[in-house]
Amino acid sequence: MNDSAPASIPGFDPADLDGHTMDELIDYLDAGRTPVDPSIEGSPGCRIALDALTRLRDLGPALLDEDVQAEPPADEGWVRQIMTNIALDARAGRRIPVVVAEPDDVAMTEGAVRGLVRAAEAEVPGVLIGRCRLDGDVTTPGAPIRVEVEASVPYGEPIAALATRLRAAVGATLERHTELVVTAIDVVVHDVRLLAAETAAETGEGKEEGR
Amino acid sequence: MSEKQAEELAAAIEAALLGTPGVAALFPVAGSLTLLVEAGAQAIGVRDEPGPRVVVRTDGDAVEVEAALGVSAGHAAAETVRRAHAAIRAALPAATPVRAIVTLVHVDVAG
């Protein structure tokens, strides 16, 4: 799992997770977030990543371990890709202003907003958001913003319907929590995956040996 | 404003923020090496260099307050930030020239 260390991710600065690695966060989750690690719980980037990792883990208790333990030959497994994107999206990024009457600097980080967008995946069971982008000048109040999310969807369900539900969930989240003027939400399905049970059935192997 | 007064003000603002509906946590403010006063001595910060949770910088009578918030998704995030900003302003003496820097850094989707 060393490949998932933030330092190995292009464009990723270890400071984005306040010096922690994705490996450390996964181990921390494995331990039930106990004992409490103040340096992780006190890091916004780590908290955003933990939120996403928790949902990823909830999708299948052994999902992370199975994929991570496998040695992908040419391309990375989809879980590894998603973990890479989780780390990248946890970066604070730009300041998105919240308008107030006084001449103060009130804002939310782009990372916090990306975390919200990513959380919308919970509204569509089985769907995982791989990457989230906010295209447009988010630092200017009222500027038009285009949202793009890459998603991994489960095999066997109509992709268009899943994308529509995800788009609606993302839109509702952004409308409720932000003042962004969202002009479009593009959902790009880049991966269709078999669920673990289906994989095992197709290969005729048990769940533990399904990969 | 004396250092002691600034410390008391920081503590008062921290209490006000944590009492604001929707505010779930305060995070260490970035750039802690340049900070003059810190409140919240509990070491919840970044590794070996815990940062303060509310920062009050003073320059003569002028005051600059900085805070980084975690909020609960049970409340609209932008509104929570606005309430937090108002709580900071309300904690300061009316005549004090002030600049507030408030940043929402995490939304607790489980909260």
Image: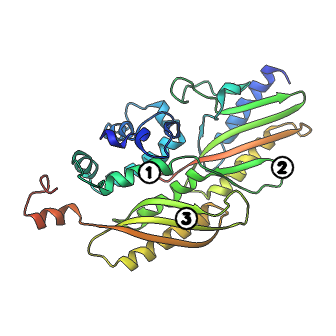
Mark 2 secondary-structure assignment: loop
Residue B111 visible here: no
Question: Depth check: A145 or B72 in front?
Answer: A145
Quick one: label 1, few (<14), some, or many (20+) residues within 10 Å? many
Q: What subunit carries mark 2? A: A
Residue shown at the point (67%, 63%) measured from the top left: A179
Q: What subunit carries mark 1? A: A
Q: Pointer 2: what residue? A: A103
| Mark pair 2, 3: CA separation | 28 Å
**Mark earlier in primary sequence (1, 3):** 1
The N terminus of chain B - image quarter: top right
Quick check: A176 left or right of B56?
left
Residue A67 visible here: yes
Residue B67: x, y in percent? 68, 39
Quick one: label 3, few (<14), some, or many (20+) residues within 10 Å? many
Which kind of residue does numbered mark 2 sit on? Pro
| Mark pair 2, 1: CA separation | 34 Å
In the picture, the disc for residue A173 is 3
* Mark 2 in CB contact with mark 3 (< 8 angstroms): no
Mark 1 secondary-structure assignment: helix
Displayed quadrant of residue A161: bottom left
Q: What subunit carries mark 3? A: A
Q: Pointer 1: what residue? A: A86
Displayed quadrant of residue A24: top left
Which kind of residue does numbered mark 1 sit on? Ile
Quick check: B93 left or right of A138?
right
- Badge 2 and badge 1 in a common chain: yes
